[in-house]
Amino acid sequence: MRRSNWTPSIVPNETDQTVYLVASGRAWVEADYETTDLETVIQDLLTGQYTNPIRVVAFNTAERWSEDVSEDVAHELRRRCDLQMRDVPFFLQDFTDRYEGRYRDVQLPLPMRLV
């Protein structure tokens, strides 16, 4: 019999498998364990399966690590769109711009004052 405060584990049963989860809006997107590999997550992002993605985190319990991989995923999304000679889909533009630093390194000109 289960305890009343029992919750199912999100930790995979197989050893040494990396899982990728997408945060969308204010919540982590629910996903089937079989669809949490990197390729599936990238394909799902490109086809609009996630609305307003804000972060992608990878973890591997066997190796005891976790990492925010949003920047790598944003670069891969842009690379694939470039290879297909298409624009990044509108629903991914904020995500890719945020993690590729498109607007982070822009220096605005200061007005010059002649003395």
Image: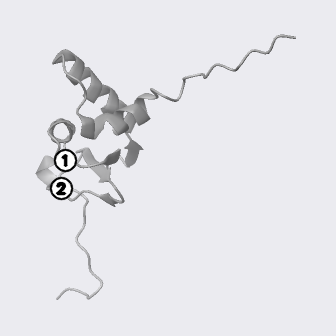
Reply above or below: 102 against 114: below
Residue 70 coordinates in the image, percent (x, y): 37, 38
Front one among 6 and 104: 104
Residue 1 coordinates in the image, percent (x, y): 16, 89
Residue at image position (26%, 75%) is 7
Check contact, mark 2 vs mark 1: CB within 8 A. Answer: yes
Tag shown at residue 106: none
- Residue 61 appears in the figure: no
Give the residue pinned by disc 2.
Answer: 31
Residue 80 coordinates in the image, percent (x, y): 21, 23
Dot 1 crowding, Cα within 10 Å, few <14, some 14–19, many 20+:
some
Measured in 3D between alpha carbons, the distance from the residue under mark 2 to the one under mark 1, in whole angstroms, is 7 Å
Residue at image position (40%, 43%) is 67
Residue at image position (21%, 40%) is 45
Give the residue pinned by disc 1.
Answer: 36
Reply above or below: 75 against 67: above
Label 2 sits on a secondary structure element that is loop
Residue at image position (31%, 53%) is 24
Reply above or below: 72 against 111: below
Task: Classify residue 7 as left or right of residue 102.
Answer: left
Give the residue type at disc 1: Thr
Give the residue type at disc 2: Ala
